[in-house]
Image: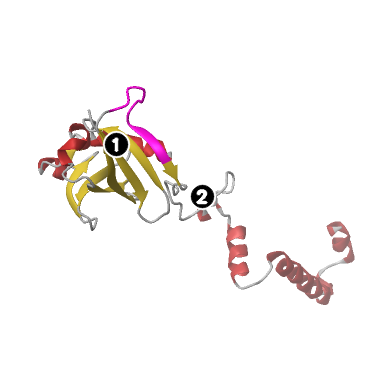
Amino acid sequence: MAVYRFRVAFEDYDGFRDIDIRSNQTFEDLHYAIHQAIGYKAEYASSFYVSNDQWHKGEEIALFPSEKKKAAGVNLMKDTKLSKFIDDPHQKFYYIFNFEQPLDFQVELIRIMIEADPKITYPHCVKSSGEAPKQFIVTTAPPAPGDEFEEDDLGPDDENKMDLEEFGIDQDEHETEADEHNDEFEGAEGDDIGFEDNEEDY
């Protein structure tokens, strides 16, 4: 049984993985071998596309096809052997992993070995170069535990403080100045406030 050696290269990043796999194994086997070699979780909708030398996408081989693709008769990875689409000694496949946050790869056949090594379990990564990009790209960092904040949780005093801060006014300083003005006003109206009343306040 022949063995194919595929070079799996990150399209937008440096680095690659060389993977040996039997010709009678499936695209699903290659899919999982790729992610074992780079350390990704593999259970996301992905597809291989038969490609020409310019990496133009042709016939699709899908892991989890949509209902529309199923109805159109798209090839399934689990049912499609690699040998079915090897028409060239340097056959190329364009591979898209995880359509929600896609990462693109260029998969090229670089060697065909006539016989498998009985001591090796296939598929098998024979060479690794470069670090894999992060599987998921986080655009907004989540709040730290305990730091969750919702405007609905604010009381009226908190809301007023937020409004003042928008204008560059310190709430505590603003309240202190207001108290001083009130004290001056109360002193000016001494006829209405007796000494005994002031003593009760202290």
Main secondary structure found in the magenta portion: loop
Give the farthest residue toward the bottom.
188
| Residue 129 visible at all | yes
In this rendering, the answer to whether 60 lies above or below 195 is above
120 within the magenta span: yes
Q: Compare residues 34 and 161 and report the one nearer the observer.
A: 34
In this rendering, the answer to whether 60 lies above or below 1 is below
Q: Secondary structure at mark 1?
A: helix
| Residue 40 visible at all | no
Residue carrying label 1: 30
- Residue 171's label in the rendered image is none
* Label 1, residues with CA under 10 Å away: few <14, some 14-19, many ≥20: many
Q: Is residue 202 left or right of residue 22?
A: right
Which of the two discs, 2 and 1, labels the residue nearer the N terminus?
1
In the image, the segment drawn in magenta is: 116-127
In the picture, the quarter occupied by the C terminus is: bottom right
Q: Compare residues 181 and 3 and report the one nearer the observer.
A: 3
Residue type for callout 1: Leu
Q: Is residue 76 left or right of residue 169?
A: left
Toward which corner of the image does residue 160 lie, by quadrant?
bottom right
- State the residue at coordinates (11%, 41%): 73
Residue 179 image offset from top left, x and y in percent? 76, 68
Residue 45 image offset from top left, x and y in percent? 28, 42
Residue carrying label 2: 142
In the picture, the quarter occupied by the N terminus is: top left
46 within the magenta span: no
